[in-house]
Image: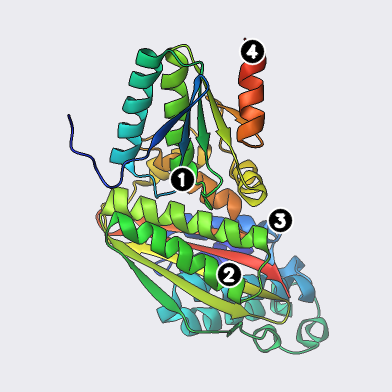
Amino acid sequence: MKPRNEQELPIIRIRDCLLVSIQIELHDRLALELQTALAERVRSQGVRGVILDVTWVEIIDSYITRILNDIGKSVRFMGADCYIVGIRPAVAMTLVEMGVELDAVSTALNLDAALEKLELRQ
Amino acid sequence: MRTVESEIGSILAGSISEITQRSIFRRLGGMARAQLQHLSTQDRHAIQAELESSVRLFAPAKSAQLIASCARALALLGAPAAGGAPASHLHRGAPAAAGMAAPIAIGKDQCLAIDSEKDIASARLEAWSEAVRIGMSKLTSVKVATAVSELARNIIFYAGKGTIELRPRQDHRETRLEIVAADQGAGIEPEKLDSIFAGTFRSERGMGKGLMAVQKLVDEFQIDSRPGRGTRVSCVFRGAR
């Protein structure tokens, strides 16, 4: 077993979804670890969706956008859906102005809404 | 044909890189291509004001000298000898240079060292709180923080280290936050710079996107990069007073 890194992001199982609440600064290594861990758990636990909660992320720049898109793509390749929830209004408007796309993930207002959408797809 | 662009360009040459000059003239729009004798006093003042703020930002060390030379060129070349407007028209009102109040500092300039990845987050926070402090809206403050985040990442990814300077200013119209990101990294070749802003360049880590994003977020944007000597990005956020 790999030693537990204090900067690891906990992945929580809710119904048949995985939830990650992003509350620390994402960087290359952490993002790659998260991407790998999620892909592995999507496969081993047969979940239907992955939800990334960014309620506590105050700034999303083009680099973070790319990380979120990469995670979304790998989750989709595994046959699950990836939802980003909790994007703040000012962050959403900034992303529009920057012209970056969050095209490899779906979005929902909050965790409830994402779970509902995922369940409806049954 | 002596246009504003050709005359002022020759004064700025050597002090401000060509690519920065080009964006200054782009901001002047049709006025840059106008022949000097056809300019109205109002146009002349607008050009002078624009040049002053650009020169202060991009060539601070030589700004006084450059501004004076530009003012002289604009005044001299538009004189009646050139066959254009009468003298009374030219000299009415205050001289352009004196008419424009320079923006004043409304707080200390801060120079943030960007040496490691964790400095990205702290630079972003610092910029955010500075924007809030000088009264910028919530949305603008988030945009400021996002732009600083992009600039700091570029410094870490491509130059290793550098600085980001925050300069809070106010002029007669508005509050401004000037942000200058500088590094002594490898620099960007002019062709690459062109393709970044044409949207056709993609680096492995998405730098093209970052610079483009900053350019779209800010109200004024200039980049000065010389291969082997580093990169300097200057931008301004404006907030209503």
Which residue corresponds to mark 3? B30
Disc 4 element? loop
- The residues bearing labels 1 and 3 have C-alpha atoms spaced at a distance of 29 Å
Residue designated by label 4: A121
Percent across and percent down for residue B156 are 30, 53
User: Looking at the picture, do discs 4 and 2 lie on one chain?
Assistant: no
Figure quadrant of residue B241: bottom right
Callout 4–callout 2 Cβ contact below 8 Å? no
Quick one: SS at disc 3? helix
In the image, residue B37 sits, relative to residue B225, either above or below, namely: below
Q: Quick check: do tags 3 and 2 share a chain?
A: yes
- Judge left or right: residue B188 versus residue A114: left
Front residue of this view, candidates B88 and B24: B24
Q: Residue at x 57, y 65 (%)?
A: B236
Q: Nearer the viewer, residue B229 or B238?
A: B238
Q: Chain of mark 1?
A: B
Kindly identify which residue carries mark 2. B131
Q: Is residue B63 above or below residue B145?
A: below
Q: Amino acid at mark 2?
A: Ala
What residue is disc 1 on? B210
- The kind of residue on which mark 3 rests is Gly
Q: Is residue B129 left or right of residue B203?
A: right
- Residue positioned 38% across, 37% down in the render: A10
Q: Residues within 10 Å of mark 3 (few under 14, many from 20)?
A: few
Mark 3, mark 2: which one is toward the viewer?
2
Q: Are marks 1 and 3 on the same chain?
A: yes
Whole-number angstrom distance, CA of label 4 to CA of label 1: 35 Å
